Amino acid sequence: MKIKRRKLPYEEVLKLPRLQHKKPLKPSRFLATVVRIVSAPTLWKTKFSYTTERMELVGNQPCLILMNHSSFTDMKLAFGIFYPQPLGIVTSVDAMSGIFGKLMRLLGCTPTHKYVPDTSLIRDIEYMLKTNKTSVLMYPEAGYSFDGRTTTLPRKMGVLMKKLGVPVVTVITQGAFARDPLYNMLQIRDVKVSAHVKCLATAEEIKEKTVAELDALLDQDFSFDNFAWQRDNKVSIDVPFRADGLHRILYKCPNCGTENKMEGKGIHLTCHACGKKWEMDEYGQLSACEGETEYHHIPDWYTWQRECVRKELENGTYLLDTDVEIAIQVNLDGVCLIGSGRLTHDLNGFHLTGADGKLDYKQSAVASHTLYSDYYWYEIGDVIGIGDNEFSYFCFPGADVSVTKVRLATEELYKMKKLKKQI
């Protein structure tokens, strides 16, 4: 999938019309049918099936559907489960760009900025539920999973549940990540996909429970590990490219400690600083070709990297300071490429400069609980996304920068700042 892009001076970008808020449309049954038909080959090829739990408590009433986010396949899976039930769908602004975005709006999609507080989105969700009388599908993680586990969830989702006062349904998939993991350069693998659909809480149960209790229920349902699932269920992915791009997740060598010298290629992950090599087996586990295997399980390696980043933040040595290429989005007409700039990230948050000093944007360390970072974003490159409800800044660093590390640093810094504020 690609996004419309054009080169434009920063001064001209400032003159572009801003995104105008529009009330969500009732989903077109015709377009929903088209999407369901288009989804059919994928559902058939993946032998898609799903189980349900407590769904008789929901019936046909509109509900809030919270689905985990593994790959672009997720939308097809949702239509495989809920069609012909009409769905309002919360979608990122960049995903609704161009003519495709106009069709998505007719389908029932409503745009929002990722990881940016948006009170209008809450009103839109209420409008879809209570005026349009449709269920609302949203991905609370907002971004695709990097390591096959839950992307950090926003706190106090229970507040939203209480405000809406409708049943909440969770959809957790198995196999969707293994079929098309983000790190693997859009290479599809032959994996059976299934899902579990559950009524997390009825409207009455939501009234009775506290926000903390509702958050705990959601955390419990979203406590998955796709690499563990693959290992434990002996799901064989015996393709010669299974480790391609694995360095996007595992950017730091546990043998020598060097960062951004890793390379995932074929079935191997190699550190080009010390020469150590690991093999990724058909069940998604790693083994050192020589010497000790520090981490067989990829999420354990990822957790170790998080701990390393946390230590850097605590001792004040963490710093990102790099040249970037900058794209800006101000409406649904794609992104504007304005040239190069400089992005820094430290204990104070992000600072982006460019356009000969005319662009100067700062974002606090507590502005968001996580970061919009992505691999091979719209087939352009690895990206760091920051911004507000008016401007989205997409920054493309060089190969010597790990957008994974920046996301980890953003999440750990947010937790540190929030804890300090509470104390």
Image: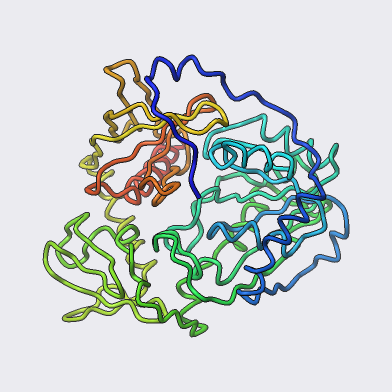
Q: Where is residue 161 in the image (x, y as percent from the top left)?
A: 72, 46
Q: How many labels does the image show?
A: 0
Q: Where is residue 412 in the image (x, y as percent from the top left)?
A: 38, 46
Relative horizontal placement of residue 383, taking residue 324 as reference (left or right): right
Residue furthest right as drawn: 60
Relative horizontal placement of residue 42, taking residue 31 as reference (left or right): left
Q: Which of 360 and 220 is in front in this view?
A: 360
Q: Residue at x 38, y 19 (%)?
A: 10
Quadrant of the image occupied by residue 65: bottom right
Q: Which residue is drawn at 33% across and 57% down?
A: 248
Q: Nearer the viewer, residue 177 or 4?
A: 4
Say if 166 sits above or below 327 in the image: below
Quarter of the image that includes the C terminus: top left
Quadrant of the image occupied by residue 81: bottom right
What sort of colour scheme is used for the picture? rainbow
Q: Which residue is drawn at 39% across and 52% down?
A: 375
Residue furthest left as drawn: 274
Q: Where is residue 286 in the image (x, y as percent from the top left)?
A: 32, 76
Q: Position of residue 163 (x, y in %)?
A: 75, 39
Say if 260 sits above or below 164 in the image: below
Relative horizontal placement of residue 347, taking residue 421 as reference (left or right): left
Say if 375 sits above or below 262 in the image: above
Say if 149 sits above or below 232 in the image: above
Relative horizontal placement of residue 407, taking residue 75 as reference (left or right): left
Residue furthest bottom as drawn: 234
